[in-house]
Image (cartoon, rainbow, N blue to C red):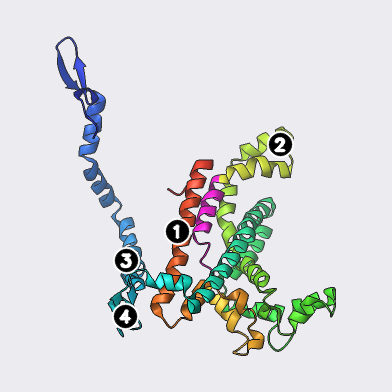
């Protein structure tokens, strides 16, 4: 415990030999004493705005925090106890996690799913994070507001399309179970009939283990890149015009202005968005993967992409043992949490920019 002295809070008068409260300390005491009263007055003054927060808080409490109680089911035995809910089973500690990591029938598929999840997430971060920044820089160089608006609407549009529509378009372009796609036929004409692409295109490139990841990343870029560029474009247009003028006086061209003016000005936004991206790194889209895996039907000829497309979310939804599925998903989420905390610490040390 720290030892407090009167000199830390009071001013000593040598002439009279007495202590008194300094004016600065009186102000601090007054602010601390009336703190909650001031907060109450601010809430009353803007009560309409705070009232609008109530629906959001209710949604978070009921659909985000209340279901967390059922996470205790991952530490219980659900199958052998014959209970209606995993949370009513017998307490078995970390056995479900041990089974997921080591037990043959679970561990093999789980580690394959985790590897595929990490690979797809890494490729998505490697190609999917810089691309919106490049798009935002491109939008900033379009001088005509009409042309820029048209281009932006066209690029944002895929974000508002259903995942079913996107997967259907991808299958139509890259080939399905009945015919070649437009792009797969073009690739065959370029690479030749004896190429590996031609061999894979017989059953559709979407169903190929070798080309599935590339197709998934391309469709993900097409879907999200335009919408994700909004934040970066907003940061770019907030850059002061005087910075551009100073760079032009120094003889900087367009590329030099991007390098020395635009990118340093939006660096804090880029870092924050990168940390948030890392936080959701392992949350690979279950719906899109599920549609790609099952779009060829039950025939194994159209499901060879299962080896490269099986991710943790798809694996968890295919498990009959609920507790085992919860253990796999929780492991995936815990690793994601560790990644975002680590990225935040590294960012704070390196750039003095962080989420918290």
Residues at marks 4 and 1 touching, judged by CB atoms closer than 8 Å = no
Residue under label 4, please give it.
85
The CA distance from mark 3 to mark 4 is 21 Å
* Residue 242 visible: yes
Nearest to the eye among marks 3 and 4: give it.
4
Q: How many C-alpha atoms fall within 10 Å of the one at disc 3: few (<14), some, or many (≥20)?
A: few
User: What residue is shown at x 48% (from left), y 51% (from top)?
Assistant: 342
Judging depth in this view, the residue of 170 and 98 nearest the camera is: 98
Residue under label 2, please give it.
248
Q: Where is residue 320 in the image (x, y as percent from the top left)?
A: 43, 83
Task: Assign a secondary structure to mark 2.
Answer: helix
* Residue 352 visible: no
Q: Earlier in the sequence, mark 2 or mark 4?
A: 4
The disc placed on residue 22 is none
Q: Earlier in the sequence, mark 3 or mark 2?
A: 3
Nearest to the eye among marks 1 and 3: give it.
1
Q: Position of residue 291 (x, y in %)?
A: 57, 80
Q: How many C-alpha atoms fall within 10 Å of the one at disc 4: few (<14), some, or many (≥20)?
A: some
Q: Earlier in the sequence, mark 1 or mark 3?
A: 3
User: What residue is shown at x 34% (from left), y 71% (from top)?
Assistant: 75
Residues at marks 2 and 1 touching, judged by CB atoms closer than 8 Å = no
User: What residue is shown at x 47% (from left), y 70% (from top)?
Assistant: 101
Q: Principal SS element in the magenta part?
A: helix
Q: Which of marks 2 and 1 is nearer the N terminus?
A: 2
Give above or below for 319 relative to 46: below
**What is the magenta range?**
268-285
Quadrant placement of the N terminus: top left
Task: Assign a secondary structure to mark 1.
Answer: helix
Magenta span contains residue 279: yes
Magenta span contains residue 14: no
């Amino acid at each position: 415990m720290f030892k407090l002295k009167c000199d830390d809070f009071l001013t000593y008068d040598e002439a009279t030999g007495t202590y008194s409260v300094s004016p600065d300390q009186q102000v601090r005491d007054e602010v601390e004493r009336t703190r909650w009263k001031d907060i109450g007055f601010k809430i009353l003054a803007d009560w309409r705005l705070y009232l609008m927060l109530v629906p959001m808080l209710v949604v978070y409490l009921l659909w985000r925090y209340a279901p967390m109680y059922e996470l205790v089911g991952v530490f219980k035995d659900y199958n052998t106890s014959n209970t209606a809910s995993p949370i009513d089973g017998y307490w078995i500690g970390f056995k479900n996690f041990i089974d997921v990591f080591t037990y043959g029938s679970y561990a093999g598929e789980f580690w394959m799913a985790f590897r595929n999840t990490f690979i797809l997430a890494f490729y998505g971060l490697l190609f999917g994070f810089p691309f919106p920044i490049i798009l935002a820089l491109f939008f900033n160089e379009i001088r005509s507001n009409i042309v820029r608006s048209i281009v932006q609407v066209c690029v944002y549009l895929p974000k508002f399309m259903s995942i079913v529509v996107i997967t259907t378009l991808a299958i139509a372009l890259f080939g399905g179970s009945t015919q070649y796609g437009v792009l797969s036929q073009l690739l065959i004409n370029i690479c030749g009939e004896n190429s590996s692409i031609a061999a894979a295109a017989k059953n559709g490139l979407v169903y190929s283990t070798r080309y599935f990841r590339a197709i998934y990343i391309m469709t993900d870029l097409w879907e999200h890149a335009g919408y994700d560029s909004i934040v970066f474009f907003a940061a770019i247009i907030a850059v002061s015009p005087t910075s551009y003028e100073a760079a032009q006086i120094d003889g900087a061209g367009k590329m030099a202005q991007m390098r020395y003016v635009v990118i340093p000005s939006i660096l804090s936004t880029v870092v924050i968005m990168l940390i948030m991206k890392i936080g959701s790194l392992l949350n690979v889209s279950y719906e899109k993967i599920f549609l790609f895996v099952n779009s060829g039907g039950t025939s194994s000829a159209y499901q060879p992409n299962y080896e490269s497309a099986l991710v943790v979310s798809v694996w968890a939804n295919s498990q009959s043992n609920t507790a085992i599925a919860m253990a796999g998903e929780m492991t995936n989420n815990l690793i994601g949490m560790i990644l975002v905390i680590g990225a935040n610490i590294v960012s704070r040390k390196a750039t003095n920019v962080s989420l918290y």
